[in-house]
Amino acid sequence: MRTATDTLDSARLTVRRFTSDDLDLVARLLADPVVTQHLGGPKDRAGAEQTLRTRALDYYDRHPGLGMWATIERASGRVVGFHVLNHIHGEPDIQVGYALFQDAWGLGYATEMSVRLLRYGFEELGLPVICAITNLDNAASQRVLLKAGLTRKGERTFVHPALAGEGSMAWFEAHRTTWHL
Ligand SMILES: CC(C)(COP(=O)(O)OP(=O)(O)OC[C@H]1O[C@@H](n2cnc3c(N)ncnc32)[C@H](O)[C@@H]1OP(=O)(O)O)[C@@H](O)C(=O)NCCC(=O)NCCS
């Protein structure tokens, strides 16, 4: 995932870099109040554009191998959402994360690509630890993280404006030396 054309495959999914042409779909995903219930609430198009620019387009070259990527269901070719392996806002820690369009929920996709990203992060990037955060009441996401082999390690709060309003958040970790699935 170090160059613009790199992709990563799991059994049913592929992740690829976003481009500026993806703004419509990112805006559609981030405008959904159900999808963004635990992601700080819906964003308008300008907010989606800022997320796309700062977390994807401008981020890739500053942090080679990391980023926010479009998640594609290979059987249909459709983009079902995104996965991330990137910095928690304002922190040095690298997180795994995801958000999917509602019609792609319940198929195991969030877990499947998270496992692939953990393997990639540990084996190809050599990361020692990969973290994740969720709202305390985001049971689906917490279940995904446990299924992907992360361990709950209490709660944390954050000062970055993107996260400060969330209050205490559930904190998860996986370590390269002990993670296995
Ligand atoms: C969280 C999300 C990515 C899950 O995607 P998904 O592809 O449906 O997840 P998976 O199918 O891999 O696994 C979901 C697991 O959570 C369980 N689950 C789903 N809803 C649940 C709920 N309300 N309470 C408890 N468990 C729940 C499922 O049963 C499944 O576990 P199982 O395999 O043991 O049955 C998806 O709901 C989403 O995009 N949510 C909005 C964005 C978001 O919250 N992202 C995470 C921010 S931290």
Image: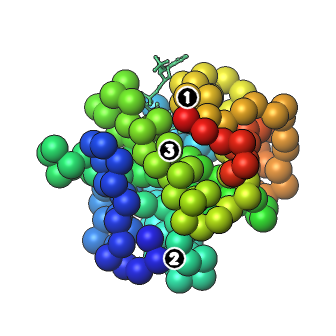
**Dot 1 alpha-carbon crowd within 10 angstroms: few under 14, some 14 to 19, many 20 or more:** some
Label 2's element? loop
Residue 71 spot, x, y in % from top left: 35, 52
Whole-percent x, y for residue 49 in the image: 45, 67
Q: Residue placed at 62% from the left, 29% from the top?
A: 146
Q: Classify mark 1 as within 8 Å of ligand 1 or not, answering yes or no.
A: yes
Q: How many other residues sit within 10 Å of disc 2, few (<14), some (14-19) or many (≥20)?
A: many
* Rendered view: 40 above or below 120: above
Under mark 2, the amino acid is: Tyr
Which label sits on residue 147?
1
Q: Quickly name the residue at label 3.
A: 114
Q: Nearer the viewer, residue 174 or 38?
A: 174
The N terminus: image quadrant = bottom left
Q: How is the image coloured?
A: rainbow
Q: Is residue 153 visible?
A: yes
Q: CA distance from mark 3 to mark 2?
A: 19 Å
Q: Residue at x 54, y 65 (%)?
A: 124
